[in-house]
Amino acid sequence: MITINPFRLATLIDNREPLDLIDVRTEQEFKSFHIAGARSVPLKKLSAPKVLQDRKRAATEPLYIIGGDRVRASLAAGILTGGGCCKAIVVDGGMEAWVSEGLSVVRERRFWDHPALLSQRTLMRMNGGVPLIIGKAI
């Protein structure tokens, strides 16, 4: 099995190298945060012919695979290699290593993260937890 260090992959991404990266975590895990440019292909739905057909890169180009940790990505690499992928490369340590190293991710923006709601929460904390409406405690 071929692996790549998270920093090396981050360098390729930062240098805008053309690459193909799939994330084999669940759809919910992917939605909460992922690497910019990654495609979500959950391990449970992984089909080597479909992934290889959907590639935008030549079949001989590397296909980078990341999971939550190395286990799911390794399983996916085995499936893809068995299905004809020439160069399946697993991101060593997966998203756990990526995040623990402080590398950038795209995060889902939740409605409660909206600046206006954050301001209201801040005001509530300043007012002892009591909601404020037009400057008056209710």
Image (cartoon, helix red, strand yellow):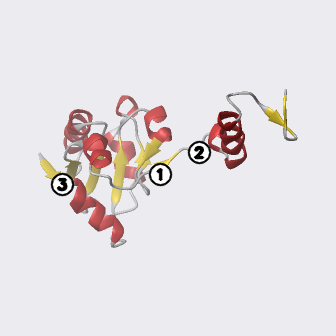
Mark 3 residue crowding within 10 angstroms, few (<14) / some (14–19) / many (20+)? some
Residue at the spot 70% in from the left edge and 34% down from the top edge: 124
Q: Amino acid at mark 1?
A: Val
Q: Quadrant of residue 7?
A: bottom left
Residue pointed to by mark 1: 106
The answer to whether one can see residue 66 in this image is: no
Q: Quadrant of residue 42?
A: top left
Whether pointer 2 and pointer 1 mark residues with C-beta atoms closer than 8 Å, the reply is: no
User: Which percent across, then down, holds residue 66?
Assistant: 30, 45
Q: Amino acid at mark 3?
A: Ile
Mark 2 residue crowding within 10 angstroms, few (<14) / some (14–19) / many (20+)? few
Viewer-proximal residue, 61 or 83? 61
Measured Cα–Cα span from mark 3 to mark 1: 20 Å
From this view, report whether residue 138 is shown above or below residue 92.
above
Mark number, residue 4? 3
User: Which percent across, then down, holds residue 84?
Assistant: 23, 47
Label 1 SS? strand
Measured Cα–Cα span from mark 2 to mark 3: 29 Å
- Quadrant holding the C terminus: top right
Mark 1 residue crowding within 10 angstroms, few (<14) / some (14–19) / many (20+)? some
Please give left or right for residue 54 compared with residue 131 in the image.
Answer: left
Viewer-proximal residue, 58 or 100? 100
Label 3 SS? strand
Residue pointed to by mark 2: 109
The answer to whether one can see residue 106 in this image is: yes
- Quadrant holding the N terminus: top left
From this view, report whether residue 127 is shown above or below residue 119.
above
